[in-house]
């Protein structure tokens, strides 16, 4: 009986990037293979070479990249030596790709349905109503509600999680034999993660689709993969079945990854990691807040959607409140209303008993010194033309608080505060790692010494080692400065690590709230139990415990 060759085979692959007239090695002598129906997860810290390997397989390496040695064989063909036209035929029909950043991967000028339909037409030749029907079916498969409405919308009208699911739908359009997913669920809540990964697992089981998952989430990798491959500094340092990796890791680096992963500490995400701190004075209160958005389309000119429905909670000084829930549940809308970027349709939002919903833009401006935001994507929120020193003091300039020597002293103080090297001050965002850029974003948010800091998925795009450093930094800053945090996150293990209270949202309503330890120990609402049961790492914890 003949042995079937692997669907993907990478042999002795080495890749370098040209920078400043010299070659900088990124991947060293990598070998891996994936059989039909198999799932391989590649994990490692930022810069370890994970995404470079994925791009090389797809023939999408940037112009400054150079393959120094090795061979990549996909379905019997060598993609390293393929002509461009052959590589184009490979994509979509044989290999589907789910990129990490949906705002880069989607065309902002095209409706969602048109972008998926374009992939359907290229892959299967369907046109007109048949292509439209397949587009709606793909949106349903990836768990998007109201698919007919979403198909008529543009990327900016969808939440981050919904945009990520659209990318997955595009990847599935050609029924590929291999799907390469680069951080496919980093922006998704645990229930949607589970739904997407279950769907990909069914494809692998029913159609023999192979999956190459690039992820920083070791819990997800261990839960879902048949084999886990650990990379560091462009090299494979360890690989094997999840049970072997988790219970008997050979390399010190693998042990460090496991120790830093909150979901793999032997407790899962069912218990809060720190004792709840006593509440300080009340800072922020939502009272019966509702928000409705017009969603006018040519077919439904008067259609409106409810983003928030009778939402009420309080935030106290020196404590962390976490808001969790599925994409589109209203988490981001709460942040925008609290920051004065949206007005509630009804209800009140009080900051120290002052109704901010009634304030005009000039009247709200003084409060901006006291309420700040750390965005999910620090690279997108930092001006690429500014040095780090210029970025962190930008709020001080905006409010006219410092100039000259005072600004230079403030920049040094803020850079020290977030534990960055002093020489970082003269560098630019593109020269920093993801974790360093996140520290810069935190420093800038703290420049005005705010009382309340909104953290929108502050560690979702970071590997577990950097995650643990950022979370420890946030904890230290809160203890030292007494600042209150409102954490928006889909990662319940992160919530368990730093939140004092949790607010669970679904479809614009709060379904449960209370101390994090109490809610995780004894969730009252079925949706909360569903979130906890779906959290990545639960299966892995069971493996470690056995």
Image: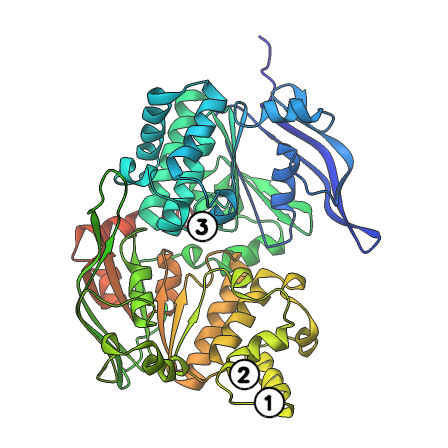
Is 185 situated left or right of 78 in this image?
A: left
Q: Are marks 3 and 1 in contact (CB under 8 Å)?
A: no
Image coords of residue 408 (percent x, y) = 64, 86
How many other residues sit within 10 Å of disc 1, few (<14), some (14-19) or many (≥20)? few
Q: Nearer the viewer, residue 201 or 423?
A: 423
Image coords of residue 358 (percent x, y) = 23, 77
Q: Residue furthest top?
A: 1
Residue occupied by mark 1? 403
Spatial separation of the CA atoms under disc 3 and disc 1: 40 Å
Residue occupied by mark 3? 186
Q: How is the image coloured?
A: rainbow
Q: Nearer the viewer, residue 362 or 457?
A: 362
Image coords of residue 307 (percent x, y) = 24, 56
Q: Residue at x 47, y 38 (%)?
A: 225
Q: In the image, is residue 15 above or below residue 376?
A: above
Judged from the image, the secondary structure of the residue bearing numbered disc 2 is: helix
Residue occupied by mark 2? 397
Q: Are marks 2 and 1 in contact (CB under 8 Å)?
A: yes
Judged from the image, the secondary structure of the residue bearing numbered disc 1 is: loop
Would residue 145 be visible to someone looking at this image?
yes
User: Which tag is nearer the camera, tag 3 or tag 1?
Assistant: 1
Is 29 situated left or right of 212 in this image?
A: right
Judged from the image, the secondary structure of the residue bearing numbered disc 3 is: loop
């Amino acid at each position: 009986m003949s042995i079937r060759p692997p669907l993907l085979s990478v042999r002795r692959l080495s890749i370098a990037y040209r920078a400043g007239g010299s070659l900088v090695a990124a991947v060293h002598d990598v070998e891996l293979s994936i059989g039909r129906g198999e799932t391989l997860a590649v994990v490692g810290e930022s810069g370890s070479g994970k995404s470079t390997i994925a791009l090389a397989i797809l023939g999408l390496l940037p112009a400054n990249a150079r393959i120094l040695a090795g061979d990549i064989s996909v379905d019997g063909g060598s993609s390293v030596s393929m002509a461009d036209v052959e590589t184009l035929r490979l994509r979509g029909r044989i290999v589907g790709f789910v990129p990490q950043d949906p705002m880069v991967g989607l065309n902002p000028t095209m409706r969602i349905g048109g972008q998926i339909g374009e992939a359907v037409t290229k892959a299967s030749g369907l046109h007109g109503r048949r292509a439209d029907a397949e587009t709606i079916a793909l949106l349903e498969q990836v768990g998007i509600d109201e698919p007919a409405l979403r198909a008529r919308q543009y990327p900016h009208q969808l939440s981050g999680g919904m945009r990520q699911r659209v990318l997955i739908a595009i990847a599935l359009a050609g029924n590929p034999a291999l799907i390469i997913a680069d951080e496919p669920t980093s922006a998704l809540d645990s229930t949607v993660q589970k739904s997407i990964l279950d769907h990909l697992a069914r494809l692998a089981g029913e159609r023999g689709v192979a999956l190459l998952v690039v992820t920083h989430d070791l819990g997800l990798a261990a839960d879902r993969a048949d084999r886990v491959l650990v990379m560091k500094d462009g090299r494979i340092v360890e690989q094997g079945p999840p049970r072997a990796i988790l219970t008997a890791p050979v390399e010190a680096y693998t042990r460090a990854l496991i120790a830093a992963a909150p979901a793999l500490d032997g407790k899962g995400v069912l218990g809060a990691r720190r004792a709840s701190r006593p509440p300080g004075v009340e800072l922020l209160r939502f009272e019966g807040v509702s928000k409705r958005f017009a969603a006018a389309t040519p077919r439904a000119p008067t259609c409106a959607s409810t983003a928030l429905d009778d939402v009420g909670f309080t935030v106290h000084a020196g404590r962390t409140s976490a808001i969790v829930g599925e994409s589109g549940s209203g988490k981001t809308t709460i942040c925008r209303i609290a920051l004065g970027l949206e007005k509630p349709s009804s209800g009140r939002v009080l900051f120290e008993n002052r109704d901010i919903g009634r304030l005009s833009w000039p009247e709200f401006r003084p409060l901006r010194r006291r309420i700040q935001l750390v965005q999910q994507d620090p690279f997108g929120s930092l001006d690429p033309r500014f040095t780090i020193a210029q970025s962190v003091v930008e709020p001080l300039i905006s409010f006219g608080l410092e100039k000259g020597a005072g600004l230079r002293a403030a920049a040094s103080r803020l850079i020290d505060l977030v534990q960055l090297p002093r020489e970082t001050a003269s560098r630019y965002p593109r020269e920093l790692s993801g974790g360093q850029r996140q520290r810069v974003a935190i420093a800038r948010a703290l420049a005005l010494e705010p009382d309340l800091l909104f953290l929108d998925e502050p560690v979702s795009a970071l590997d577990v080692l950097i995650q643990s450093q950022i979370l420890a930094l946030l904890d230290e800053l809160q203890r030292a400065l007494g600042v209150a945090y409102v954490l928006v996150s889909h990662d319940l293990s992160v919530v368990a690590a730093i939140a004092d209270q949790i607010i669970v949202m679904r479809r614009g309503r709060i379904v449960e709230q209370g101390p994090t330890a109490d809610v995780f120990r004894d969730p009252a609402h079925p949706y909360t139990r569903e979130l906890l049961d779906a959290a990545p790492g639960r299966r892995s914890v069971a493996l470690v415990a056995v």
